[in-house]
Image: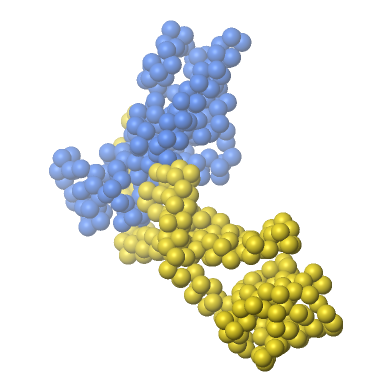
Chain colours: A blue, B yellow
Amino acid sequence: MVDHSLCENQTDESLVGMSLVDPDHFLCLSRRYEDKLLRYIIRVSKFSREEAEDVLQDVFIKTYYNLNGFDKELKFSSWIYRITHNEAVSAIRKKSVRPSIAFEEEDLVKFGDVFDMTKEMDNSLDRKMIDEALYRLDEKYREVLVLRFLDEKDYTEIADILKKPTSTIGNLILRGKKLFKEEYEKLTYGK
Amino acid sequence: MENKNISQIAIERIKEEKIKPISRKVFNLKKIFFWTAVVLSLIIGAFMFSLVLSGLFNNDWDLYDRFGFNFIFKTLPYFWLGSLVVFTVLGEYYYRQTLFGYRHTIIVVVGVYMAFSILFGSAFYIIGASDFFEKALVDVTPVYRNIIFNRGEVWTHPEKGLLSGKITEVSDDEIKIVDGDGLIWTVNVNSLSDRDDLNLKINDQVKVTGDIMDDNFFIAEELRFW
């Protein structure tokens, strides 16, 4: 049995190597990402917590199964986010649900800071409006906005997660912000 | 967000279902395959470009005045241009499958591919590799032979003064050639000013301009090799 307190000082990359020798070490890695990835799945899908947990289980199993394919030139977090993103997208398609964003209070604050909308965002109606404004965006804009402003990934990491050029990510974020603001304003005026 | 069980459940499933990571060899083989495909498509693309150059430089531009734009237009090396496009698309696709292939835009990847093709294709053309490659293709590929020697049937119009085919007999004043339709032509080569220098041999593929005089009889004004 692995002493998980010993994992704490290990980098993701060394834990990958250790997991290949003893699968119990993989528990250290998966625990490290469990909350972040679960939150990400819930944000980009309309899944309940239980459904998101099922997707996350599959993510961990797929990650372990492909562990030898992890290249240390890439950040482990980008790699596991990529797998999570792909699994979430595939689960959304299978269930044919409308992709949506599940906001928590801290998400609202993050979004408010970025879009300078904090004054208006303290009730559930605004939360719904942000959700609706994001839903109205094309998927390509929605996913970069979530990764950039809610998961706080930098451009290179988003490029690695979504497998797109960094310059494309920059353009998508710029355009996505503009479109989101326009949609949000349309909804606010109609309130 | 409280969530303590998913990792534990996942690891238990991994153990129960005896899931093992895919061997590193599989991933290494995939990497080798895609990089080999990238390099091969680059090299083939460069050859394609050298053949485009060869087609352009050997396109009988001097006959433009006599036979018009249509003649030149029909004899451009479309086959190689098309092949170059196909290998550029393949090269771009295989590069995308490499580890960081997605990091560059399609314009950059195609631009680098084209630059490589132009640079090395020109080098292949200058050192004569394109001629060697083309001859080898003609010898072993009947489909290619048909494309090249009957391209647009442009050179198979004796009534317009254009004849082409393979030499089957050579005598002092005449040669016999079999054209793309299988017809045997007797070609008088007396009026060729460079007759002695041409060193005509059986099986040479030639293009002849001149005048049709009678059924399957042609007087050559000029003769060129394919």
Does residue B222 sit above or below A75 in this rendering? below
B172 lies left or right of A138: right
Residue at 71 percent across and 59 percent down: it is: B65
Does residue A128 sit above or below A81 in this rendering? above
Residue found at the very far right of the displayed protein: B214
Classify residue B37 by image quadrant.
Answer: bottom left
Residue found at the very far top of the displayed protein: A119
B42 lies left or right of B22: right
Seen from the viewer's position, the closer of residues A159 and B51 is: B51
Residue at 67 percent across and 92 percent down: it is: B171
- Please tell me how many numbered marks the rendered image carries: 0
- Residue B147 position, x and y percent, is 66, 71
- Which part of the image, by quadrant, shows the N terminus of chain B? top left
Seen from the viewer's position, the closer of residues A130 and B3 is: A130
* Residue B42 seen from this side: no
Residue at 46 percent across and 57 percent down: it is: B117
Seen from the viewer's position, the closer of residues A132 and B169 is: B169
- Residue A10 position, x and y percent, is 17, 43
Does residue A106 sit above or below A154 in this rendering? above
Classify residue B197 by image quadrant.
Answer: bottom right
